[in-house]
Amino acid sequence: MAIRKPNKLPQPTVLKQILRRCSSLGKKHIYDDDNSVTGLPLDVPKGHFAVYVGENRSRYIVPISFLTHPEFQCLLRCAEEEFGFDHDMGLTIPCEEVVFRSLTSMLR
């Protein structure tokens, strides 16, 4: 009997799933071109997404291009381990704000 390897999704697909599963606080429904409802916040520009960082859950808007950086992917894995995906808190990054700002300033 052969051992089956689990189906491993490509990394971009996994990252998109992370963003879809993590809802943002105070989101408003908007309509796509095909009139389907999306849950994207209206104040987040195209090509960006919101994250919440630190004890006070300060909100930051970051470009989607950060998803390609291994350092940011590590933060997402930490968020998944600590909070999982089944919650209504929005995408929360479990690190101090100073560390997050320092990392994101290096990625820009």
Image (tube, rainbow, N blue to C red):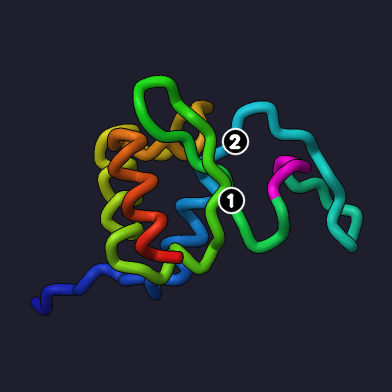
Q: Is residue 65 above or below residue 87?
A: below
Image x and y of residue 104, in percent? 40, 55
| Quadrant of the rendering where the N terminus is positioned | bottom left
Q: Main secondary structure of the magenta part?
A: loop
Bounds of the magenta span?
40-44
**Around disc 1, counting alpha carbons within 10 Å, would you say few (fewer than 14), some (14 to 19), or many (20 or more)?**
some
Q: Secondary structure at mark 2?
A: loop
Instruction: Check if mark 2's residue and mark 1's residue have beta carbons within 8 Å.
Output: yes
Answer with the quarter of the image where residue 105 lies: bottom left
Q: Residue at label 1?
A: 49
Q: Which mark is residue 74?
A: none
Q: Is residue 95 above or below residue 44?
A: above
Image x and y of residue 18, in percent? 46, 52
Please name the residue shown 74% across and 42% down the image. 43
Identified by mark 1, the residue type is: Phe
Identified by mark 2, the residue type is: Ser
Nearer the observer, 10 or 73: 73
Q: Is residue 31 above or below residue 70?
A: above
Q: Residue at label 2?
A: 24
